[in-house]
Image (cartoon, coloured by chain):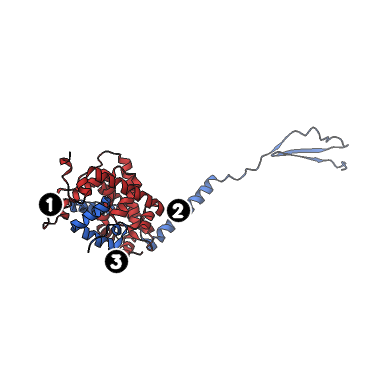
Amino acid sequence: MHVDPAQLASASGAKRAVMLAHLRQCAPCRREAAAHDPAILFALLAYTPIPEPLLADLSAEVAHRVGRDPSTIGVLAGAAAWPRRAAVAAAFVLTLLTGYATLKEPPAVPPSITRSHPRADVDVSAGSGVSQVIDLTVGDTQIVMVYNGELKL
Amino acid sequence: MRDDEDLIDLIRAAAGGDRRAFEDLVLRKREQVVRTAFQITGNLEDAKDVAQGVFLRLWRVLQRFDLARRFDTWLYRITVNAAIDYVRERGPKGILQALPEDAGELLRDPARGAEEQLDLSQLQNAFLRLAARLAPKQRAVFVLKDIEGLETAEVARALGVTESTVRNHLLQARRVLREGLIRDYPALAAGYGAPRDEDRS
């Protein structure tokens, strides 16, 4: 079997692996592939060896870092993650309630009731007889109470 | 295309927090990740750093992986993005690092004469020098399609681009590499071994 360079350029998967394995060993096929397109030869870099000590070092470092990463336990636990999610949700709701209670306006303080002077536009002495006048101001509202037994409204 | 059942079981266990399963997954995929990162960064130590970051990220996001998809495509995507980011942050310094001395031995056939041999370490170093002229996405497309052997659609998914973009990048990358090989490495371009880089005039 010899490798068709045009097919190798478009092949993938197992078929490509077989063609590459042959190209690796067969100098005439490599020359034919190079004559078709020299860049095809770079496909052989799939065999580039990675030094085993480097790979072993990588595995050890990743295992060490993952082992020191407790934050991921539970987060990765799929279905077992619901208690954590519930705890987070409860904390969130509690934070909202606390914030609401802290930030909401304090209850309105009833305005103080004070006596004030009679208003100038109320003529309380218009009637005959004795009048009693009580002038109260509640907030912005002024209340004038007049008692006169002879007053007719 | 779905992954084989063994790999799916391993992914499911690792995503559930099983560290032993995750270590097995690293063992199974580490060479692919380092090799891909190496072809993009051009430096083995940098490739190891990239691979470490890729696997730590994988540990954190594995639960998001959709088992109906192909794991390798997802892993290539993480790897290529991490390698391109690494190169951008690192800058142009220290790009090239030759393979170990015995790398070329893997392709040697003792039954054939020296002129029949193709020295893999020379081919690798030629690629690293020539690929430095490619844009990051062009280089990534070439690595995934012509070295790792992914299909065009998979490369497109891994890089988040259209298949048409993949084909365009691939055409340009092949042209740059072909012209560079013929100009700078004529013996390699003819399919033979070549004098070592330091012997070239």
Q: Inspect the image, locate mark 1, and give the three-letter code of the amino acid beneath it.
A: Ala
The chain displayed blue equals A
Vertical side of B166 occupied by A118: above or below? above
Q: Position of residue B123 (x, y in %)?
A: 21, 49
Instruction: From the image, tell me which residue sits under label 3.
Output: B6
Q: Is residue A150 left or right of residue A91?
A: right
Residue beneath the point at 45% across and 53% down: A91
* Secondary structure state at the residue bearing disc 1: helix
* Secondary structure state at the residue bearing disc 2: helix
The chain displayed red equals B
Instruction: Give the mark toward the camera: 2 or 3.
Output: 3
Determine if residue B34 is in view.
no
Quadrant housing residue B152: bottom left
Vertical side of A119 occupied by B134: above or below? below
User: Which is more toward the observer, A44 or A79?
Assistant: A44
User: Which is more toward the observer, A11 or A113?
Assistant: A11
Quadrant of the snapshot with the N terminus of chain A = bottom left
Determine if residue B50 is in view.
yes
Instruction: Give the mark toward the camera: 2 or 1.
Output: 1
Residue beneath the point at 23% across and 48% down: B189
Q: Position of residue B20 (x, y in %)?
A: 26, 60
Quadrant of the snapshot with the C terminus of chain A = top right
Given the current orientation, which residue lies at the most extreme bottom position? Answer: B5
* Secondary structure state at the residue bearing disc 3: helix
